[in-house]
Image: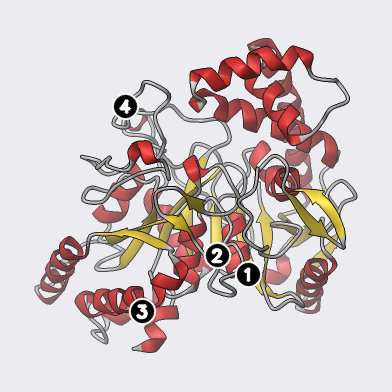
Amino acid sequence: MSELAFSSATQLLRAMAEGRVSAGELLEHYIARHDRFNPALNAIVATDFDHARDLARAADAARASGQPLGPLHGLPMTAKDNVDVVGMPCTFGSPAFREYMPTKNAGAAQALTNAGAIIFGKTNLPLFGKDLQSYNEVYGQTNNPWDVTRVPGGSSGGSAAALAAGLTGLEIGSDIGGSIRTPAGFCGVYGHKPSWNTVSLRGMLPPTPGGNPQDYPFEVDLLVAGPLARSADDLELALDIIAGPSPSAGTAYRLSFPKPRKDKLADFKVGLWLDDATCPVERSVGDALQAMADSLARAGVNVRQAQPDIDFRQSNSVYLQLLNAATSSSLPDDMYYFTRGAAPYLDKADQSPRATWIRASAMAHRDWLRLNYQRQLIRQKWGDFFQEFDVLLCPVAPVTAFCHDHSDIMTRTLSVNGKPSPYVPTLLAWAGLATLAYLPSTSVPIGLASDGLPVGMQIIGP
């Protein structure tokens, strides 16, 4: 059964439908792998095996009696720790929520269980999802299965690591700064950031100060939920299940996705944006990206260097300001008032990560509206680009998985082509292109860099 661990969810579902493995056997296979491999990785941080076994027995009985449970009938899977799942804690990586046990499933989790999935575990993330590596005071550090001295990415780092290590069949995560795509790229799996507001965030957000985790949340600017998996087919399968309006909005409309623009790979017109002076790409990553572009060209795809008529630096600046504004509501009051007091005294020339965070967290609504206007202009230019091109290919991140670093996030650096580069802007820049414009983006594994670590490529669409 060893091949099952790295089979796609689509393949696993087919194996169960054909009677080659039962839901119970598949679950026990994952539990055995969890016991053997998870201690070194710390990807899965909470489990509910007893309830999962009950569900697996029920799934097998339903199949034997000819009663299909849905498109995910009997599939064992895990969910990111910020996703409410009854029977397991939802800590957001914060000691304040160490004992919080949801009384109802998140909207996306409920949709997956309604489709027949069996959620048996929760996967690790950074504190409140605010980092591109995955460690916290509650569960500790998650390691990359390719090299445990390196990060799996974040914030859906446990999700990607669990998939890459063959510990789960499917995953659900969230993304506001590459939090699905970067871990998928670092761990060599697939991850999809949907268009904004196509998947409900109910039950996936930490409460604002003084709030209750059970409150129905508002939609957060830029933030989305989406699947991680071991194949593109799995992403499509999962997204079709979880996409749709929140329960309250669902009384007014339904969501359906259009069919693909083209039927054959060679019919697609593909733009390439593989490097930029604003955020240079490590040479070994760029070589892997170019090799993939060359292979597409050899397959007859119309591939050429082209990008939207936008300035990378300006787009990134708008994105970072709106990102920090979007997350400011969750700041404790004392931290928020600190930013209000500090912002007027910042040197205008200071564009450091800390200064950017302070200004954006304290900005007036008038300033936000001006940034949003710039965003709308950028979105129009992306729309113009997609009148001619079907997709844009670009890096997920400019580096491969880096070594663990728990120092101050505002002063960390990464080495890019032998030169130090600021941690936060470097890791957010390429992912932010699609996030700012509310565009869907899929991270796909395209091979290994010269350091032997996975490289991911973003496919951005309209």
Visible in this render: residue 310? Answer: no
Distance between the Cα atoms at labels 3 and 1? Answer: 26 Å
**Mark positioned earlier in the residue sequence (3 or 4):** 3
Residue name at image x 66 percent, y 12 percent: 341
Helix, strand or loop at disc 2?
A: strand
Give the residue pinned by disc 4. 212
Query: Which residue is denoted by mark 3 in the rendering?
Result: 36
Q: Nearer the viewer, residue 41 or 391?
A: 41
As shown in the figure, which amino acid type bears the numbered disc 3? Arg
Q: Residue 327 in the image: state x and y as whole percent.
A: 56, 30
Q: Quadrant of the N terminus?
A: bottom left
Q: Residue at x 76, y 55 (%)?
A: 414
Q: CA distance from mark 2 to mark 3?
A: 24 Å
Within-10-Å neighbours for mark 2: few <14, some 14–19, many 20+: many
For disc 2, the marked residue is 190
Amino acid at pointer 4 = Asn
Q: Where 336 falls versus 6 (above or below)?
A: above
Sequence-wise first label, 2 or 1: 2
Whether residue 155 sits left or right of residue 3 in the image: it is: right
CA gap between label 2 and label 4 equals: 33 Å
Viewer-nearest of discs 2 and 3: 3
Q: CA distance from mark 2 to mark 1?
A: 7 Å
| Residue position marked by numbered label 1 in the rendering | 445
Mark 1 lies on a secondary structure that is: strand
151 lies above or below 316: below
First in sequence, mark 2 or 4: give its number.
2
Q: CA distance from mark 3 to mark 4?
A: 37 Å
